[in-house]
Image (cartoon, rainbow, N blue to C red):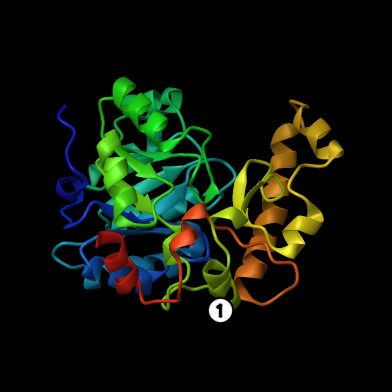
Amino acid sequence: MTKSSLQKLLNIEHPVIMAPMFLVSNVSMSIEAMKEGIAACIPALNYRTLEELRQACRELKAAKTENGAYGFNLIVNKSNPKFMGQLEVICEEGADFIITSLGSPRSTIEAAHKVGIKVFCDVVGEEHGKKVASLGADALIAVNNEAGGHRGDQGPEQLIKNLNETCAIPVISAGGVGCKADIDEMLSYGAIGVSVGSPFIATQESSVSQEYKQACVDYGADDIVVTEKISGTPCTVIKTPYVEKIGTKQTTLERILNKNKKLKKWVKMIRFSIGMKAVEKAANQATYKTVWVAGPSIEYTKAILPVKEVVKKLLD
């Protein structure tokens, strides 16, 4: 197949998706993003109930612009007991696209395509890329080693080129984009567009605390570290004094348990639950236990701005 541009795929003006960010993304941010001609995506897990998710779907549908698009991110494995209900709500209410993470997207692709919703899948390498392409995914979200939060281990150029060589569907690059030059660079590697998250944390419409937003202004790329303390898998966070104090590596006991085939799944689930609660607490209130998730592209964050100004900075 011919690899379409992201603009054509989503009927948007610019090849940019405002990435789904746990606790950060919300309806207000997404509406402002659509007004600027880009797409926006919200994690379904940002809504505690299915009714809250349904209301968000309806608000976004009512506010959708002619050259903007909106979607939701779904965690599609067993760690998310709300998955099937969330998928059902989104398919009932409608969206332009779904981004899947952490599992097989088979059931999501089947359900979404029946109602005309496109499905993009997070991948970190060629093997998973080929699998989801064979299931009928519409595009790949290539999560590279410069992404904020859970990241891949390949650099942007290598990952994009490898996926283009092995998969027949379009590639959208995620990670390492903070300015127009970065977007142009990803497109030159063969991506059809980019997914951008961290530069939008410190926006006026963002849901997180002022302390979290200000941290994205005060810290830069050199202050980002990779930690295993949140979910047991590599995750990028700001190196606050608290992060330095607790360290970034798993304990000896955690490493031993993670090697046990019978216990590995349960250890990861417990670590993920504990880590996410810590992230949620830090995102919503000032605390000395600050675990703020972000990527190196906060280097370009110099002030807390409206979403529309961040979009303009990315495109100028």
User: 254 left or right of 44?
Assistant: right
Q: Nearer the viewer, residue 11 or 59?
A: 11
Q: Quadrant of residue 39?
A: bottom left
Whether residue 138 can be seen here: no
Going by the numbered disc 1, the residue's amino acid type is: Gln
User: 65 left or right of 283?
Assistant: left
User: 241 left or right of 149?
Assistant: right
Q: Residue at x 40, y 29 (%)?
A: 158
Residue, disc 1: 210
Q: Nearer the viewer, residue 100 or 115?
A: 100
User: How far across and down, in percent of the image, does residue 242 sit?
Assistant: 76, 63
Q: Residue at x 20, y 51 (%)?
A: 10
Q: Residue at x 44, y 70 (%)?
A: 52
User: How far across and down, in percent of the image, does residue 27 sit?
Assistant: 37, 71
Q: Quadrant of residue 29?
A: bottom left
In the rendered image, which quarter contains the C terminus?
bottom left
Question: Within 10 angstroms of label 1, few (less than 14), some, or many (20 or more) residues?
Answer: some
In the rendered image, which quarter contains the N terminus?
top left
Q: Residue at x 16, y 58 (%)?
A: 13
Q: Count how many numbered circles sit on residues in the image.
A: 1
User: 224 left or right of 296?
Assistant: right
User: How far across and down, in percent of the image, does residue 124 sit?
Assistant: 47, 34
Secondary structure of the residue carrying tag 1 is helix
- Relative to 9, say whether 153 is above or below: above
User: How far across and down, in percent of the image, does residue 4 sit?
Assistant: 17, 38
Whether residue 183 can be seen here: yes
